[in-house]
Image (cartoon, grey):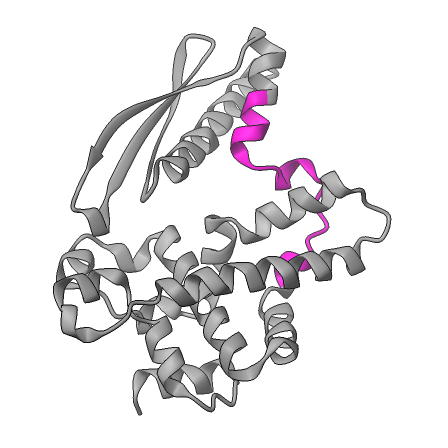
Amino acid sequence: MAPARELAVRLGLPFRDLALLEQALVHSSYVHERPSAGLSNERLEFLGDAVISLVISEALWERYPDEDEGSLTTRRAAIVSARGLSRIAQRLDLGSYLVLGLGATTAGERARKSVLAATFEAVCGAIYVDLGLDQTRSWLRQVAAPELVETNPIDPLKPPKSVLQELSYARNGRAPTYRLVSDEGPPHARQYVVEVVVGGQPLGRGEGRSRRDAETEAARQALAALRGARGADHE
């Protein structure tokens, strides 16, 4: 069975045009190495991003009728972030179907959160174009159900950089600073390393396909360090 057809069966969707799903699985690195291969999934990724935002916003608006705009925005940001979407992509095993260039494969792009999130967006774009909004909405709500029913307090859903900024101001009266450590790799597989400093101390270092992703990971590590230190102080 062809990969796209196999994935369509796995997703439980009656695709009419499998070429759309095939395109959704083509990473730009593959087209970069083989210009005759046609289009990558970037156009579908662009469309899927908008569709996901709409469907998730609508679902959250219905599920949490008593929450204000700020709380709903925070919940949506947690779900549609690279980390949130990559978690859904991993559950669907999208990485196994992704078509990558040799360089990107060697660099481990298949497992990167940003790549998995972008692939999920492209797949959603393909579903929308082929099957329409109603079927996309129904499917997306189903696969994102664990995220939509999240019952934890809002704070854990806040982006790590926002939480770290609040803690930094509370402890030191100033915001954390992010320093670019390195920016290496070919254009299709750029890798950023960023360090975050809180109160004059480097507390976290993160890597990512973009500087923003690297900063988010650095903030997450810094939060873990701060919380660990706070726990030790109370022992």
* x and y percentages locating residue 139 in the rendered image: 60, 75
Number of numbered markers = 0
Q: What residue lies at 21% left-to-right and 60% top-to-bottom?
A: 29
Placement of the N terminus among the 4 image quadrants: bottom left
In the rendered structure, the answer to whether residue 136 lies left or right of residue 91 reads right
Res. 88 visible in picture: no
Asked if residue 117 is positioned above or below residue 163 in the image, the reply reads: below
* x and y percentages locating residue 131 in the rendered image: 55, 83
Depth check: give the residue in front, 3 or 93: 3
* x and y percentages locating residue 59 in the rendered image: 72, 62
Placement of the C terminus among the 4 image quadrants: top right
Quarter of the figure with residue 164: top right
Asked if residue 189 is positioned above or below residue 144 in the image, the reply reads: above
Depth check: give the residue in front, 205 or 125: 125
In the rendered structure, the answer to whether residue 99 lies left or right of residue 36 reads right
Q: Main secondary structure of the magenta part?
A: helix
Depth check: give the residue in front, 130 or 103: 130
Is residue 1 within the magenta segment?
no
In the rendered structure, the answer to whether residue 172 lies left or right of residue 58 reads left
Quarter of the figure with residue 89: bottom left
For the record, the magenta segment spans 146-165
* x and y percentages locating residue 150 in the rendered image: 68, 53
Q: What residue lies at 67% left-to-right and 44% top-to-bottom?
A: 73
Asked if residue 189 is positioned above or below residue 94 in the image, the reply reads: above
Q: What residue lies at 39% left-to-right and 80% top-to-bottom?
A: 20
Q: What residue lies at 47% left-to-right and 66% top-to-bottom?
A: 91
Res. 202 visible in picture: yes
